[in-house]
Amino acid sequence: MELLPIFLDLNGKPCLVIGGGTTAARKVGSLLRSGAAVTLVSPTLCETLERKAEVGEFRYVARCFEPQDLPGNRLIIAATDEGETNRHIAQLANALDIPVNVVDDPEACTFLLPSIVDRSPVTVAISTGKASPVLARLLRTRLESLIPAGYGRLAEFSGRYRHRVKTRFTDQRDRRRFWDRVLQGAVAERVFAGQFEEAEAIIEQELAPDALDQDMGEVYLVGAGPGDPDLLTFRALRLMQQADVVVYDRLVAAPILEMTRRDARRIYVGKQRNHHAMRQEEINRLLADLAKDGFRVLRLKGGDPFIFGRGGEEIDTLAAEGIPFQVIPGITAASGCAAYAGIPLTHRDHAQSVTFVTGHLKDGSIDLNWPALAQPNQTVVFYMGLVGLPIIVERLMAHGVPAEMPIALVEQGTTHMQRVYTGTLATIGDIVTAAQPQPPTLVIVGEVVKLRDKLNWFSPPDEPVQGATVPIL
Ligand SMILES: C[S@@+](CC[C@H](N)C(=O)[O-])C[C@H]1O[C@@H](n2cnc3c(N)ncnc32)[C@H](O)[C@@H]1O
């Protein structure tokens, strides 16, 4: 190891920054966040520093640096825009044995400021030694996306129980098992969601002398988006990697399923038109029973669980039986397909509203509010509208929508199999007969469809691309 990573307690300690530009401002920001008492010496200040100086966030000395500024400081940062001055400061600091950082001059530094992922009190510091600060920043960006924003809160929350847990579990292994459960289970999820009282109730229950070994599990109702795994949310991904059982639908793309925990049990409950692997009531029951058996259950659904996904019905049973659950939104097919087809769903000149409707009702009919759907200046998106398309077209025209109204069908949207068919209400029937699109297909009706000619950006590759886009089978 070229350098030793350490975390310094600078709270209230004097630190000196020399220079008044934007780089100095960043360094001052880091020092202030750690509670240091900062003095800054510079004849001029950038805007950010001026604002901070005005409210007294640091002591400002408005002149050029002088050697007597150095003694008595814990750290010195040389951030003037003159390399020679910076090196001179470094030499003086070295002579006084004060650690010094010189901006853009790693050779002159006796310490480096790492790239930081700040989830205080959790702090991740990344350094590539003196080799490549840019690489450190890239790594930081990756870690930012992996570490939920709530980790700081979780650390603080667990800190409050540290002593009690030590007393309650004298065996180190028991203690570790307890913390594993807390930091990866229902308590952590409650803290991330800001539900501190619920988190406290669970941890108190687990700390009770007569606590049962068998915990209540939990259900995560997660939207997997329309197909492209890159469209998952961070939260969805985290819960996918922690659930013990995965209950999934037909519309969940294979690479997304692959991102769930390797050793998780997978249960397929997919629904196809006229063929249901499991009835809805059975799915509701299954989720509740698995959670009662103590499992963390991932209910993974295509798109968004609350948009034509029967997510409401599934959590209804859970709520009635007092089973903890959380709902993680996903990108719904309308947003995903429209974006990947280059069709903005609203547009100042063409559509002031957008309506999502189902083209398939429980009893097989399509009994919709046609007069409302036929109004101009709107976009209407039909989910499950492929089979009923002839009726949809006929009803819209019967209610006054012109035969030239543009319409798009997006098949396998956002995947490498995406196909988009555009036409008008008058022509789409022949297009469907010729092209035979298959489910899942989304139907978009409105003037906005015309914008695709100009705004289309996504061209699916001819061959499957590793991971990102595969068909939903
Ligand atoms: C039962 S609904 C589920 C909708 C889902 N909950 C959502 O928010 O996207 C299924 C319908 O969504 C549409 N759909 C879902 N994913 C799609 C995709 N990748 N491409 C095209 N249409 C899709 C199709 O119209 C399909 O018949």
Image (cartoon, rainbow, N blue to C red):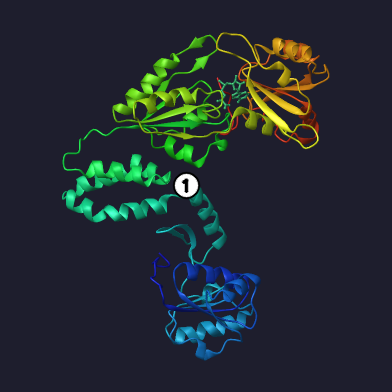
Asked whether mark 1 lies closer than 8 Å to ligand 1, one says no
Residue at left 50%, top 16%?
271
Looking at the image, can residue 273 be seen? yes
Where on the picture, by quarter, is residue 357?
A: top right
| Picture coordinates of residue 245, whole percent (x, y) | 37, 28
Q: Where is the C terminus found, in terms of image quarters?
A: top right
- Residue at 51% in and 20% down: 250
**Residue 461 figure quarter:** top right
Image position of 217 (left or right of 226) = left
The residue lying at 59 percent from left, 8 percent from top is: 364
User: Would you identify the image quadrant in which residue 159 lies?
Assistant: bottom left
387 shown above or below 312: above
Q: Position of residue 291 (x, y in %)?
A: 33, 28
Q: Which image quadrant shows ligand 1?
A: top right
The image quadrant where one finds the N terminus is bottom left
Q: Residues within 10 Å of mark 1 (few under 14, many from 20)?
A: few
Count of marks placed on residues: 1
In the foreground, 165 or 367: 367
Residue with the mark numbered 1: 146
Give the answer, above or below, for where 431 lies relative to 151: above
Q: Is residue 222 left or right of residue 175?
A: right
**Whole-percent x and y of residue 79?**
58, 76
Q: Is residue 104 visible?
A: no
Amino acid type at circle 1 is Leu
- Could you say which is closer to the camera, residue 65 or residue 293? 293
Image spot of residue 393 (x, y percent): 74, 13
Does dot 1 land on a helix, a strand or a loop? helix
